[in-house]
Amino acid sequence: MSRRGRLVFSLAATAAIAVALGTCVWRRHTQEQARIAAARDAAELAAIERSIASLIANARDAADLPGASAAFALPDGRVGTAVTGFADTASEVRITPDTRFLAGSVGKSFHAALAVALAREGVLDLDAPISRWLGREPWFARLPNARDLTLRHLLQHRSGLIDHLYSLEFIARELKLRMFEEDGALIAPEQLIEPALDRKPKFRAGTHFGYGDTNYVLAGIVIERATGRSPFDQIEERFLTRLGLSGIVPARSRRIPGLATGYQLPVNPFLLPPKMLDEQGRLPVHPMLESTAGGFASTPSDLVRWAKALFEGNALPADAAAEMTRNPVAAGDGRSYGLGLYRYETPLGRAWGHGGWFPGYRSELRYFPATKVAVALQLNRDFGVNSDALMIEIARRVRDGSQR
C-alpha cells in the first residue's frame, strides 16, 4: 500500500472509531435520559398515588366505610391506584388494586358502546322502531309507546317507560324467587320488564328524559334478537378481551372471583342482608338481576382504562365514540345524558362518565376530555359518603400532581 493509501486508510479508521465512540456516547446519553425520565415519571405517579391514598383513607375514617379503591389514568396512559380498608371487615381481608366491586350502572357504557358499534356495522339502526326486532313478541303491544320507540330512545332514557326496579311487582317477584323458590335463580329479561307493561306512558317517546333500568334491559333484548347472541358475550369479545381489561367481568354467577363484600343498611328496599356475601362468598341475589342495565364486576384500574379506550379511539372508531356524546339530553339535575354516559359540568371542566349502584356497592367513573385524565372510585358500602365530591377531589389531585 502506498503512503497515500496508508494515510487514507488511517484517516478512515480514525473517523470510524470517532463515529463509533460518538454513537456509543450518544446511546449512553439517550439511555441515561430515558432512565431519568422513567424515574421522574415513577416518582410523579407514586406521589399522586400517595396523595389519593391519603384522601380516601380520610374519607373512609370520616364516613366509617369498610373500604375504598380508586384509580386514575394520566394523559400518557399511565395508571395509578390507591386503596384503603377491608374487602371483608370480619376476616380483615384488605382491599387490593385487584379487588373487584359490582359496578352497577357503569355497565350501561358498555352496552351503549356495543349498540353503537353494531349500528356502525349495519346490524342495528339506532333510529329505527324497535318493532323491527320485537314486533312479533306477544308482549310487545303492551309496552307504553310501543310503536314509537327506537333504540336511541332506550339508550338515552327517553322512552317514557317506568323503572321496573322500583315497582312493587318486581320487588315481590324477587323476594318470592329468593325466599320460596330456587335459591339465587335468575329472572329472565322479558320477565324483568313485565312491571312496565300496560302502564300509562310517563311522557311521549322522545320528548323528555326519565332514567330507568327498564330502558337498558329492553335495549339488551333488542341487541340479542338482532344478533342472536348475548350482549355480554359480545362485550367480552369486542372490548374486554381485546383491550386486556381482565379486571372487568360479566357478573354471571353469585360467586365472583375477587369480589369485595358489600355492606348496606339493615333495613333496605329489597330486604337483603346487610352483608352481601355469605360464608361461601356467594351473593344473596343473582347479580345478573341487573341484566343489561349493568351486569359487571370491575376494578377501578380497568374502569379508567376503559374510559381512555372509549374516548381516545381504541374501543370504537372516533366517529362511533362521538355518537355516544352527540346531542345529550338534559337530565334535570344539572347533568346531561348521551348514550350510556352522563355529561358532568364540574369545577375542573366538563367530564363524561357514569355512576353505579348495586346493593352494598357504589361506583363512579369520569373522563375529562380537555386533559385526557380518567378517574374511578369504588366503595363496598352503598350509603353515607358524597362520592361526587370525592371524585372531584381525586381528579383535582391527579391534575395538580401531573402538572408539577
Image: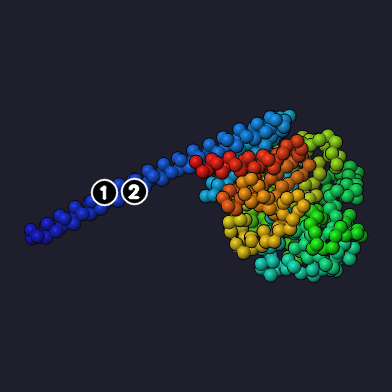
> Could you say where residue 237 lies in the image, as x and y percent from the top left?
65, 58
What amino acid type should be assigned to the residue bearing mark 2?
Answer: Arg
- Camera-side residue of 380 and 37: 37
Q: Is residue 2 left or right of residue 64?
A: left
- Hey, what amino acid is under mark 1? Leu
Q: Position of residue 249 (x, y in %)?
A: 68, 49
Q: 170 above or below 154? A: above
**Does residue 248 appear anywhere in the picture?**
no
Q: Earlier in the sequence, mark 2 or mark 1?
A: 1
Instruction: From the viewer's side, name the closer residue of 166 and 188.
Output: 166
Let me know if residue 397 appears in the view: yes
Q: Residue at x 85, y 65 (%)?
A: 146
**Local SS, label 1:** helix
At 65% from the left edge and 31% from the top edge, which residue is drawn?
A: 58
Q: Which residue is mark 1?
A: 21
Residue 299, position as x, y percentages in the image: 65, 44
Q: Is residue 54 above or below residue 118?
A: above
Q: Is residue 6 above or below residue 134?
A: above
Task: Please tell me how crowded label 2 is: few (under 14), some (14-19), or many (20+) other residues with Cα within 10 Å.
Answer: few
> Can you give x and y, in whole percent of width and height, for residue 80 in the image?
57, 42
| Colour scheme shown | rainbow
Give the SS element for disc 2: helix
For this rendering, which residue is in front, 235 or 156? Answer: 156
| Residue position for label 2 | 27
Q: Quadrant of the N terminus?
A: bottom left
Quarter-wise, where is residue 232 in the image? bottom right
Residue at (68, 53) in percent of width and height: 343
Cα distance, mark 2 to mark 1? Answer: 10 Å
